[in-house]
Image (tube, rainbow, N blue to C red):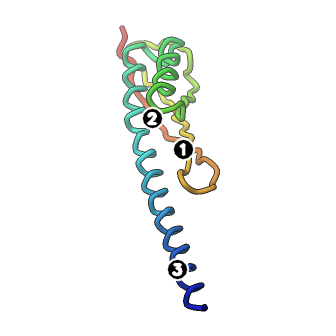
Amino acid sequence: MEHGIAELAKIYIGFMLILTVVSAGLFMFQVQDVNTFKQSVNYQIERSGGLTTEAVNNINKHSKENFGGKYTIKSSQLNKKLDYGSQVDYQVIATIPIVFLPIPDVNLVFGGNSVSQIR
């Protein structure tokens, strides 16, 4: 009888370890997606001359369509058109869910900057 209970405990612990490793792997995969999103933010900043209203709308649309809306932009230069060569500093706020485990979503902040390319 004790062997049966010990065997069930081993199976349960093994299953939980596998779920934890898979969850960590999926979390890391989702974190690396922020680089792709930052690349599209940089493109919008360069083509729009800063974080203009149009650029922010395009960024939010891109986030919703391609990333499920888990990224948002925060900047002190929001909704401003800047001169050619002006640097734009921003933060990407990522809300990343933990898959398979009953843990709250993780909020991470990633810094970024780009240069306005509009004359």
Q: Nearer the viewer, residue 49 or 22?
A: 22
Label 2 Cα neighbours within 10 Å, binned few <14 / some 14-19 / many ≥20:
some
Where's residue 112, x and y in %?
Answer: 45, 35
Q: Is residue 41 above or below residue 53?
A: below
Q: Amino acid at mark 2?
A: Gly
Residue 61 image offset from top left, x and y in percent = 50, 20
> Mark 3 — residue?
10
Query: Considering only order in the chain, which callout, 1 or 3, is on the residue closer to the N terminus?
Result: 3
The residue type indicated by label 1 comes to Ile
Quarter of the image containing the C terminus?
Answer: top left
Q: Which residue is mark 1?
A: 96
Picture residue at 47% right of the left edge, 32% below the top = 67
- Estimate the spatial distance between the alpha carbons at disc 2 and disc 3, rounded to whole Å: 46 Å
- The residue sitting at 63% across, 55% down in the picture is 102
The CA span between labels 2 and 1 is 18 Å
Question: In this view, which residue lies farthest toward the bottom?
Answer: 2
Left or right: residue 87 versus residue 74 is left
Residue located at (49% from left, 56% from top): 23
Residue 112 is tagged as: 2
- Tell me the SS state at disc 2: strand
Q: Residue at x 54, y 35 (%)?
A: 70
Dot in front, 3 or 1: 3
* Structural crowding at the residue carrying mark 1, measured as other residues with C-alpha within 10 Å and reported as few (<14), some (14–19) or many (≥20): some
Is 103 placed left or right of 26 in the picture?
A: right
